Amino acid sequence: MKRVTIIIAAILLAACATKKQKAAEEKVPVTTAVAESRTIPNEVRAIGNVKPQQTVAVRALVGGELKRVWFSEGQDVRKGQVLFSIDARPYESELAQAKANLARDEAQLKNAESQQARYADLVKKDYVTREEYEKYSTAADALRATAAADRAAVQNAQLQVSYCEIRSPLDGRTGSLMVHQGNLVKANDTTPLVVINQVTPINVEFSIPEAQLAAMRSGRNDKVPVSALPQGGGAPIATGTLTFVDNAIDPQTGTITLKATFPNANRALWPGQFVNVSVVLSQRPNSVVVPAQAVQTGQKGQYVYVVTGDNGVEMRPVRVAQSIDQLAVIDKGVAAGETVVTDGQLRLTPKSKVEVKTR
């Protein structure tokens, strides 16, 4: 009986040894990528808000009936283009009256100047007294002042008539129409007739932490390139240049405001839109990059699994300089040309063998 027990135990031990050997030889399926050497931009990233370069709230400078609207809502308009017409008849009547007053007073002035000139000759010959001459001279001076006031009144009336035709002060795009044809408008009303935004070119305003300001200032040149990217990621939708750095850091947020100007000829950027902003300060040649998913984080920091020549893996600590476009820029730990594991790391140990899955 004892002998049978020994034989059974030996068989079980042999079976366990076989299973352990098979388990040790089991290969873990993984996905890999090759570390590459690239030129990577040294950039600062932030979230920006698209803002029109100019915004004008168009208001009437005279009151009256809105006779006509010369544009459609959301239409592009040019500087100097007629937008609104206000009933000008009351102001044209005032202009005609001002011109009539001017003509009357100029006629009276002409007569007074003639009298003044005649009495100037007579007083020299002592035919009239000095007091009589002064009377006509004073009358002529008073009429000169009256005529000057009349000319100012004519100019003001002409200005009021010109205000009845409202023109666009800039090239831009109109918004919603606030007052429609046939309504009465007030001079300098709080509600504008329409708001016009300049969208070409256009600005993107963004903020960066004060810690990045030194890099921004050291990397500045005449034209610092700036890219606007969609919030969901992807290729840049517009490129422009940095045009403004605020003169002070906000002490409450510890950030500083910057602006970039984009030509925006294709209208890719729209006022109020939020975009990701990338400011390229310089280029970093010969940078080692791996897919971002290859980098794992453990108790001792970040690491990657590097595939060795015998289909084994090596757990190697790395230092990531930056992440850009789903790539990790490796400062230390991986060399260009080495193969790293990008998927399947959870099942790996330093003694594992791997089987590379084909995509």
Image (spheres, grey):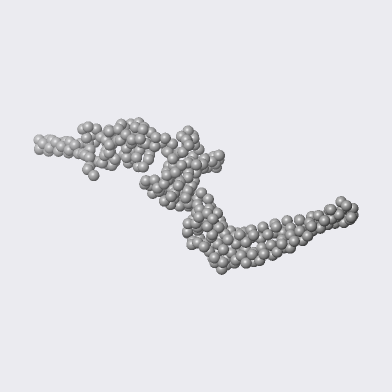
Question: Outermost residue toward the bottom?
Answer: 182
Residue 147 on image: x %, y %: 74, 58
Question: Quick check: 220 left or right of 110?
Answer: left
Residue 125 on image: x %, y %: 88, 52
Q: Which residue is at the front of the view, 184 or 353?
A: 184
Q: Which residue is at the front of the view, 258 or 305?
A: 258
Image-quadrant location for residue 285: top left
The residue located at (43%, 52%) in the rendering is 267
Residue 18 on image: x %, y %: 15, 37
Question: Quick check: 30 left or right of 220?
Answer: left
Residue 80, compared with residue 34, is above or below; it is: below
Report the quarter where the C terminus lies. Answer: top left
Q: Which residue is at the front of the view, 293 or 103?
A: 103
The residue located at (51%, 41%) in the rendering is 244
Residue 31, compared with residue 163, is above or below; it is: above
Residue 64, compared with residue 233, is above or below; it is: below
Residue 193 on image: x %, y %: 56, 60
